[in-house]
Image (cartoon, rainbow, N blue to C red):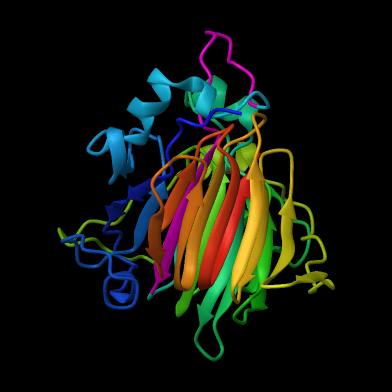
């Protein structure tokens, strides 16, 4: 394995969507001059919000620029597209929902690539914090028709058809493309998704933006991509935590696009980044340092995101921290 690779600490892009709050700045130290600060795109090569490398030889470059020069950093598991280009397939975010997000849906890959020239968007949520009584929307309570949906949107009664789920800290939800959904007020979420920014809003509570305009809805596109059958059972399932000397590891989600683990480091954590895939560390709490091979050790803490290029080799984390580890 290569020994000249570097651990990259990333600086996020921010989004000031009207439903956001201030917790990402106040609790996670995000120095982004936006109010509200609804989302931070922590690891992103998407042109709508690229993250920037903060350290090392690539400092000041966007992660997209680095990976354009070094596609091998993505790993052999990610295959080139039809144009022969290999792109980072995931986007990692923090989301602070002070208010309800819109009721929305994302298309699958086939539809999005044909209509939007982007990937589709399947995603997972890890609930970092949730106010008492906080909830999310996940699918319908019963099968719906296009006509029923149209009437419900027009009359403001869509809520009674949707499955509402109470959420708590530590909950995990996988949201495949085509699932109508919405994150509820009072929820702080880490989101891992396909690298895409295609969202079709179905209903937005008749809110207006800072200019007094209602946000655009996308009813026709939403109906084309939406699963209008009854929602799947998403009752909480047992998750298995594996304990080791110095850390614990828990698989949160495995899908065709990514794998996400929750890591709790109490002293030390060792793992290997192979040639097959990059890895991403998203720190949820605490402080630690990481070193690998001949690269400079990198300190990180709550809210920080690190990109570990494929082939980095054996890595060592020393400290006390909770993090998500993402790879293909």
Q: Is residue 39 above or below residue 235?
A: above
Q: Give the position of the C terminus as an image quadrant.
A: top right
Query: Residue 112: image x %, image y %?
Result: 55, 29
Q: Give the position of the N terminus as an image quadrant.
A: top right
- Name the residue at 33% across, 70% down: 24
Query: Residue 129: image x %, image y %?
Result: 51, 79
State left or right for residue 217 relative to residue 11. Answer: right
Residue 7: which quarter of the image? top left
* Magenta-drawn segment: 78-97
- Res. 215 in view: yes
Q: Is residue 238 above or below residue 145?
A: below
Number of on-image labels: 0
State left or right for residue 147 relative to residue 65. Answer: right
- Name the residue at 51% across, 28% down: 73
Q: Is residue 64 above or below residue 156?
A: above
Query: Residue 14: image x %, image y %?
Result: 28, 54
Farthest bottom residue in view: 132
Asked whether residue 238 is drawn in magenta, I would say no
State left or right for residue 80 relative to residue 44. Answer: right
**Nearest the eye: 76 or 167:** 76
Farthest top residue in view: 83
Asked whether residue 85 is drawn in magenta, I would say yes
**Nearest the eye: 282 or 168:** 282
SS assignment for the magenta stretch, majority: loop
**Nearest the eye: 302 or 100:** 302
- Res. 178 in view: no
Farthest front residue in view: 294
């Amino acid at each position: 394995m290569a020994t000249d690779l570097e651990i990259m600490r990333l600086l996020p892009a921010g989004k000031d969507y009207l439903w956001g709050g201030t917790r990402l700045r106040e609790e996670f130290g995000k120095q982004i001059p936006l109010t509200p600060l609804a989302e931070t795109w922590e690891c992103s090569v998407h042109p709508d919000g690229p993250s920037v490398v903060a350290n090392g030889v690539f400092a000041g470059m966007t992660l997209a620029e680095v990976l354009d020069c070094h596609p091998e950093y993505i790993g052999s598991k990610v295959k080139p597209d039809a144009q022969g280009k290999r792109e980072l397939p995931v986007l990692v975010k923090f989301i602070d929902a002070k208010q309800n997000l819109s009721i929305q849906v994302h298309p699958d890959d086939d539809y999005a690539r044909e209509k939007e020239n982007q990937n589709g968007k399947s995603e997972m949520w890890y609930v970092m914090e949730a106010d008492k009584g906080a909830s999310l929307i996940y699918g319908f309570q019963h099968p719906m028709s296009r006509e029923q949906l149209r009437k419900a949107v027009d009359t403001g009664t869509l809520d009674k058809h949707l499955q509402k789920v109470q959420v708590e800290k530590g909950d995990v939800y996988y949201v495949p493309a085509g699932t109508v959904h919405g994150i509820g007020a009072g929820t702080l979420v880490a989101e891992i998704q396909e690298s895409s920014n295609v969202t079709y809003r179905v209903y937005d509570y008749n809110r207006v933006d800072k200019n007094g305009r209602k946000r655009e809805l996308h009813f026709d596109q939403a109906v084309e991509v939406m699963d209008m059958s009854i929602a799947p059972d998403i009752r909480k399932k047992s998750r298995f935590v594996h304990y080791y000397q110095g850390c614990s590891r828990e698989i949160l989600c495995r899908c065709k696009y990514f794998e996400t683990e929750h890591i709790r480091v109490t002293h030390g954590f060792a793992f290997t980044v192979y040639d097959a895939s990059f890895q991403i560390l998203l720190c949820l709490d605490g402080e630690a340092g990481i070193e690998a091979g001949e690269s400079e050790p990198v300190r990180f803490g709550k809210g920080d995101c690190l990109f570990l290029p494929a082939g980095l080799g054996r890595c060592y984390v020393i400290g006390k921290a909770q993090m998500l580890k993402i790879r293909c």
